[in-house]
Image: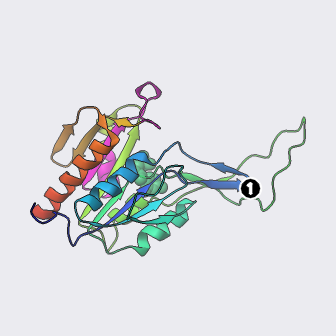
Amino acid sequence: AGPKPLAGRTAIVTSGPTHEPIDPVRYIANRSSGRQGHAIAAALAKLGADVTLVSGPVTIPDPQGIRTIHVEQAEQMRDAVLSQLPSDIAVMVAAVADWRVTTSAGQKIKKTPGEAPAPLQLTENPDILRTVGHHEKRPTIVVGFAAETQDIEQNGRIKLEKKGADLIVANDVSPETGVMGGTRNRVKLITESGVEEWPELDKDEVAERLANWIAEHLNQGAVR
Ligand code: C5P
């Protein structure tokens, strides 16, 4: 076998959800198993990249032989990602909570039966992909994901532009697809030059193909 196509390259991958505390025992989160992100980290490493995985709280094991930073909240995830720049590749797969509770309670909030609960005040979380996509140390290849339930291509295209990404991997996460938490995925690759549809594949196969796509485009020079 020849040299690995990503030998000497560095990559940052985010995976899993973030948990935004309401109080010490409750949190806000998105659904995410971390399967797709962890598989991408492993696939990039298999091609020779030096990978740092930044993972939110998941129940799956850390991929073997990959430096994994564990975080809970979006702000911690952002800090961990930025601490790894510069990097050749960034693949932001995490399902980051869009909002956090403005001031989480230091003690468990007690319910008073029959009384209306206090409303939660929310603050927008940092957009990690967008921060990386517009950073002065922007990686050569920046990849984002778009979990959509409708208008997948159009939303993907908007996201590409807004986030400063080279590629958006868009998937349909409507409940009937079983993608969320499942082992299979069906994605569309959205770049400035168009849309490429992949068949339904195992998340491991999506990861392998994506790692190859990244290696090809990186070795051809910048995408944008
Ligand atoms: O805007 P939306 O959440 O749909 O964008 C999804 C993409 O942006 C994913 O790649 C996700 O990892 C990334 N993202 C992020 N930080 C956020 C929100 C989303 O990195 N706060």
What is the basis of the colouring in this image? rainbow
Q: Position of residue 168 (x, y in %)?
A: 29, 48
Write the residue at 74% across / 55% down. Answer: 23
Mark 1 Cα-neighbour bin, 10 Å: few <14, some 14–19, many ≥20? some
Q: Is residue 58 magenta?
A: no
Picture quadrant where residue 50 is located: bottom left
Write the residue at 14% across / 57% down. Answer: 216
Q: Position of residue 11 (x, y in %)?
A: 31, 65
Q: Is residue 102 visible?
A: yes
What span is colored magenta in the figure?
157-182
Q: State the count of labels.
A: 1
Observer-nearest residue: 149 or 203? Answer: 203
Observer-nearest residue: 184 or 165? Answer: 184
Q: Quadrant of the C terminus?
A: bottom left
Q: What residue sits right under mark 1 in the picture?
A: 23
Observer-nearest residue: 136 or 172? Answer: 172
Q: Position of residue 105 (x, y in %)?
A: 76, 59
Q: Is residue 157 visible?
A: no
Q: Position of residue 172 (x, y in %)?
A: 37, 33
| Residue type for callout 1 | Asp
Q: Is residue 179 magenta?
A: yes
**Left or right of residue 76, residue 210 in this image:** left
Picture quadrant where residue 20 is located: bottom right
Answer above or below: position of 165 versus 171: below
Answer above or below: position of 162 versus 219: above
Observer-nearest residue: 67 or 147? Answer: 67
Q: Tag 1, which secondary structure?
A: strand
**Left or right of residue 132, residue 194 in this image:** left
